[in-house]
């Protein structure tokens, strides 16, 4: 049997960030069931960094992640991880109150302003005249190079002496006096701490170790790309304030989404044609775009527990079992803070001072809050 200080289960962005941070503190093995890390939700996101669209502790984790994303350690990434992508959260006349409520909270942030329909149309000339009554403009939102960030973590893990094992789905988890014994195919590893970063499968993994689940629900969200008739440089991402749809500029094309939340069991989720068609209808109603061709469509699972906050922390009822799950729609932009938090909770049992100062509390994220 092999031994390690930390075994991290799940090689998406959450597990990669945690493994990278833990590898600086002890021997670390990252186990990923698929042949490619990032095959599931991490490889299927919209890659957005936004502070205005989130609230409370998720916003705090996002803002706390920004310095790392802006200034990663030397050698971490070949190119900048962030590039400017303004976000326009739009509302029709019947959604003006929703925009106002969000503005109350979000305009306290720097570079977030409440604008009228005319100003929104100046920022995004594709909007149908008269469609938008009010909007929130977040001018310093960013696009994240998700692959650059993910690969940076995985390379950094190796540089720190850690190991990524692919095709290594965890089959069994057994608690011992010293921690946990994990089996994944041919590997049997004894570790003091196991980190459950299995994304939509986090409750499935918990059950393997007879750990009580936290009630995680994966929700499907569909996305697709379509060609742009005009130059997209400088355009904002446009988001319906009730999340009825969104579209995001990419070079020569747009990514669109119905922004739906369809609950389901964890699996390799596929897009539904009806969701693509509905999103196209809504985007065409809001803009002058005519979408005749969809180049590619996909779907991913965004996983939430009941209060929609992440679950991060050592399980008090199951020593050595650390949860890192429930990132919902914010797992990429919060990954740096979440990775640092998971590593600190695994070793010192405390929230790092900078995250505590940013408003992150261990209680708000604790796994046992789901078991009242
Ligand atoms: C359409 C869409 C748009 C999104 N847009 C954004 C955005 O703009 N910004 C943002 O920050 N976030 C966004 N998200 C959310 C973000 O993608 C997720 O929060 C994040 O990817 C979750 O990462 P993860 O590592 O927890 O999950 P995953 O990437 O799913 O990784 C979990 C891994 O665990 C592995 N695993 C499962 N069971 C086992 C096992 N038994 N043994 C070993 N490995 C196992 C899986 O194979 C998987 O690779 C979006 C998501 C979707 C679907």
Image: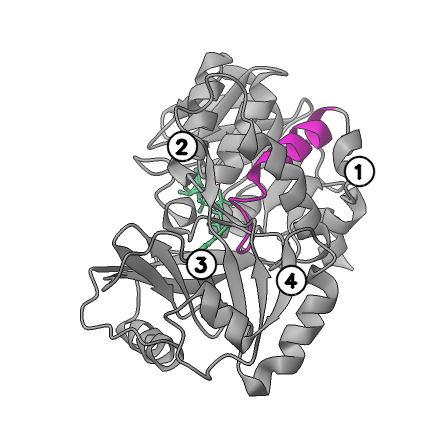
Magenta span: 328-347
Identify the residue position indicated by label 1 in the image: 356
Residue 107 visible in the displayed image: yes
Spatial CA span between label 1 and label 3:
32 Å
Spatial CA span between label 3 and label 2:
22 Å
Q: Is mark 1 within 8 Å of ligand 1?
A: no
Residue 127 at x, y percent in the picture: 40, 74
Identify the residue position indicated by label 4 in the image: 113
Residue shown at the point (55%, 33%) measured from the top left: 70
Residue shown at the point (37%, 51%) measured from the top left: 44
For the residues carrying marks 2 and 4, which lies nearer the camera in this image?
4
Name the secondary structure under disc 3.
Answer: loop
Return the mark for residue 236: 3
Q: Are marks 1 and 3 in contact (CB under 8 Å)?
A: no
Residue 283 at x, y percent in the picture: 36, 75
Residue 124 at x, y percent in the picture: 43, 66
Spatial CA span between label 4 and label 3:
14 Å
Residue 244 at x, y percent in the picture: 47, 75
Q: Are marks 1 and 2 in contact (CB under 8 Å)?
A: no
Return the mark for residue 341: none
Q: What is the crowding at mark 4: few (fewer than 14 residues within 10 Å), some, or many (at least 20)?
A: some
Name the secondary structure under disc 4.
Answer: strand
Name the secondary structure under disc 2.
Answer: helix
Identify the residue position indicated by label 2 in the image: 148
Q: Please determine whether, in this image, residue 26 is positioned above or below residue 298.
A: above
């Amino acid at each position: 049997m092999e031994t390690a200080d930390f075994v991290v289960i799940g090689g998406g962005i959450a597990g990669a960030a945690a493994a990278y941070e833990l590898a600086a503190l002890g021997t670390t093995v990252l186990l990923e069931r698929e042949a490619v890390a990032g095959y599931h939700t991490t490889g299927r996101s919209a890659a957005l960094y936004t502070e205005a669209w989130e609230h409370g502790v998720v916003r705090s984790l996002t803002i706390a992640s920004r310095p790392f994303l802006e200034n990663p350690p030397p050698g971490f990434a070949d190119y900048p991880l962030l590039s400017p992508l303004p976000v326009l959260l739009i509302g029709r006349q019947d959604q003006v109150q929703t925009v106002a409520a969000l503005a109350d909270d979000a305009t306290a942030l720097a570079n977030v302003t409440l604008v009228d329909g005319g100003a929104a149309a100046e920022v995004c000339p594709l909007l149908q005249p008269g469609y938008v009554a009010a909007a929130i403009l977040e001018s310093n939102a960013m696009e994240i190079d998700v692959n650059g960030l993910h690969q940076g973590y995985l390379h950094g893990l190796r540089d720190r002496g850690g190991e990524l094992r692919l095709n290594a789905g965890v089959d069994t988890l057994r608690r011992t006096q010293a921690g946990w014994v994990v089996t994944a195919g041919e590997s049997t590893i004894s570790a003091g701490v196991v980190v459950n970063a299995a994304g939509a499968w986090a409750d499935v993994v918990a059950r393997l170790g007879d750990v009580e689940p936290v009630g995680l629900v994966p929700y499907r969200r569909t996305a697709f790309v379509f060609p742009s008739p005009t130059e997209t440089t400088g355009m904002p991402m446009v988001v319906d304030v009730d999340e009825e749809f969104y579209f995001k500029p990419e070079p020569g094309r747009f990514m669109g989404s119905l922004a739906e939340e369809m609950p389901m069991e964890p699996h390799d989720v596929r897009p539904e044609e009806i969701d693509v068609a509905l999103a196209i209808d809504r985007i065409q109603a809001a803009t002058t775009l005519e979408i005749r061709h969809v180049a590619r469509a996909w779907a991913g699972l965004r996983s939430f527990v009941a209060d929609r906050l992440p679950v991060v922390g050592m399980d008090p009822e199951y020593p050595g079992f650390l949860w890192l799950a429930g990132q919902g729609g914010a797992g990429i932009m919060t990954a740096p803070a979440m990775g640092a938090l998971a590593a600190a909770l695994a070793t010192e049992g405390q929230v790092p001072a900078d995250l505590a100062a940013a408003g992150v509390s261990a209680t708000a994220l604790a796994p046992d809050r789901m078991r009242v």
